[in-house]
Amino acid sequence: MTGELSRKKPIVNIVWFKKDLRSSDHKPLSEAASNEYPVLPLYVFEPDYWEQKDTSQRHWEFTKQSLESLRQDLGVMGQALVFLQGNILEVFDQLLKTFEINAIYAHQETGNAWTYARDISVRSWARLRGIKLIEYQNNTIIRGLTNRDIWSTERDNFLSKPTLKKPYIRPIDAELSEISTKMKFKGSTVLKNKQIGGSQNGWRYLESFLEGRGNHYRVEMSSPLLAERACSRISPYLAYGNLSVREIFQFLHENHPKIKQMSPSIKSFKSRLAWKDHFSQKLEDDFSIETTCLHKSFENLRPLVPDHILLSAWENGETGFPFLDACMRYLRATGWINFRMRAMLMSFASYHLWLDWRASGQILAKFFTDYDPGIHWPQVQMQSGTTGINTVRMYNPIKQGIDQDPNATFIRKWVPELGHLSTAEIHKVGTENFNAVNFETHYPRPVVDLAKAGREAREKVWAVRRLHGFKSQAKQIVKKHGSRQNRSKDFVNDRLEIKPKARVNIQKSFEF
C-alpha cells in the first residue's frame, strides 16, 4: 500500500444540553454514558435564539452561571462541558470533521416557537446523515399525548420512578473554550438577577425553604413584602433544568419525617409543581398558544399594534398607580415577583390598558429570570381573558395595594417619589378621591381612568363570550386542555386563596 494511511476519527456520543442544565436525573447523559463510546457533553450558544423577542441578557446571565456549574460537575464525572457558538446545524457539521458521531442524545424541549422549529431542523439534519438522534421525555411533559385523561396518571408514574444518578463519563480529547459571548443584547437595560444559576444554588433554596422559610408559605405567598422569603424561589432552577421535578418530589418524600410540621405548606407547594406541569403540557399539546388566542373568538379584539405610550408607561413602572408601578420596578430590578403580582401586572395591561397580550407578554418574558414558555404563555392568555374557559378576573391595583401593602412600605421603597405622602394619601393616588392639590411630585398622573377602563374592558370581553358558538368552542378547549385535577392527588385547591368554582375556571398560582 502506498500513500499516507487515513487517520480514523474517534467515535463519540454527543449529549446536547438545552434547558436541562444539570448532571443528575438526566436520562440523555445516563444513556450516552452507558455504552463503550466516549461522551461529548455539548452546549451551543445560538445567536439567532438570543435575538428572539422573548429572550434577554438576564436569561443569558443565569444560563451562563448554570453552564459554569454544569461544566464543573461534568469535569468531576470525567468530561467537562464543551461550549460552542453558532448555528446548531453548522456546529454539528463542524464536529463531524473531527468526530464520527454515533448518536446525539437530548431531552425534548417545550420551548418557544423558535426552539420548536430548531429541533425539527436538527431531526432532519440527523436523518439525512444517518445519525441517530435520541430524544427523551423531559420531566413529566409527554410529547404526542392523544388523551389528556391519562396525563395525571402518567405523571404520577414518572415521578415514582427512581432518579438517575450521576454517571461516569468516558472522556474525549476536546478543547474547552471560555463560556462567554460578545453578543450585544438588544434593549438590555435590565441585567442583574437576584438569584445565581446552577444546581447547587437551586438545592440551597429548596433546603432553606424546608428548614423554615416556608413555614407560612400558604399565608405569605401573595404579599410582595413577604413572598420573597416565604416562597421556595426554585422557579428559575426548574426553568433552566438545574433541578428536575422528580428529584424535588422524591426529596420531599425522603425528608417527610423532618418536614411533617410543614404539611399544609408542602401540600400547596406540591400542588403548584403539578400545575406547572399541567400548563407546560398545554403548550406541548398546542404550540400556537404562544402566538394565537386559545379561543379564536378573541383574535383582533384588542389592537394588534399596541398603544406605545401606554405600553412604555406600563413597562417602566410609570402608570400613575403606585402599587402596580412598585411591582413592575421590583420585577425589573430583581427578575422575580410573586404570582399574584404577576397576574395583576398582566391583567392591568390587557384589561385597563387594553394592550394585546403578545406585546406585553414578551416584555414580561424578558423581565422574568424564571421565564418558562410552558407556564408563561398559557398564563398570559389566562390573565388576559382569551382562553374562553377561565373566569374573567380583573385586578384592581389600588385595592391590591391596600390589601397587600397596607402600610405602603413596599410602595415607598420602589416609588420613592411618593415618600412625602401619608399612607392614606399614597393609597388614594389614582382614585377619584385623591386631592391633586397636594400632589407635588414628579410621579406621573394615572394613564387611564381605572373605573371607566375596567368597565369598558369587561363589556367588550363579555360581548365576545355571548357570541353564538362561543360555548361550543370553549367545550372543545376544555376537552383538549382541561386540568382533570381530580385525577391526581397533587392538585389541591387551597381554601385560603380561592373559593370553590367549576374546575375549568380555577386560576392556579405558581409560587415556587
Image: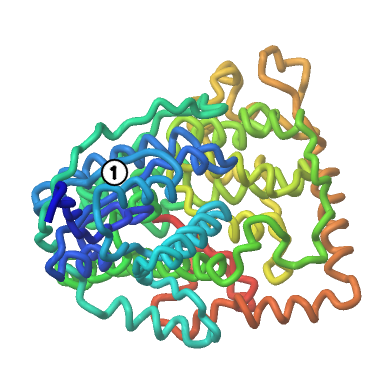
Residue type, mark 1 in image: Ser
Q: In the figure, 364 relative to 484: above or below?
A: above
Residue 212 visible: no
Q: In the figure, 35 relative to 315: above or below?
A: below
Residue 394 on image: x %, y %: 70, 53
Figure quadrant of the N terminus: bottom left
Read off the residue under disc 1. Answer: 66
Q: In the figure, 95 relative to 317: above or below?
A: below
Residue 147 on image: x %, y %: 54, 86
| Image color mode | rainbow
Task: Determine the residue positioned at 62% across, 29% down.
Answer: 317
Q: 332 and 501: which one is in front?
A: 332
| For residue 406, side relative to residue 447 (left or right) | left
Q: In which quarter of the image is residue 400?
A: top right
Q: In which quarter of the image is residue 286?
A: bottom right
Residue density around tag 1, few if under 14, some if 14–19, many if 20 or more, within 10 Å = many
Q: 170 and 477: which one is in front?
A: 170
Task: Determine the residue positioned at 40% across, 59% down.
Answer: 218
| For residue 421, side relative to residue 149 (left or right) | right
Figure quadrant of the C terminus: bottom left
| For residue 26, side relative to residue 334 (left or right) | left
Residue 417 visible: yes
Residue 406 on image: x %, y %: 54, 39
| For residue 345, side relative to residue 492 (left or right) | right
Q: How many marks?
A: 1
Residue 18 on image: x %, y %: 37, 53
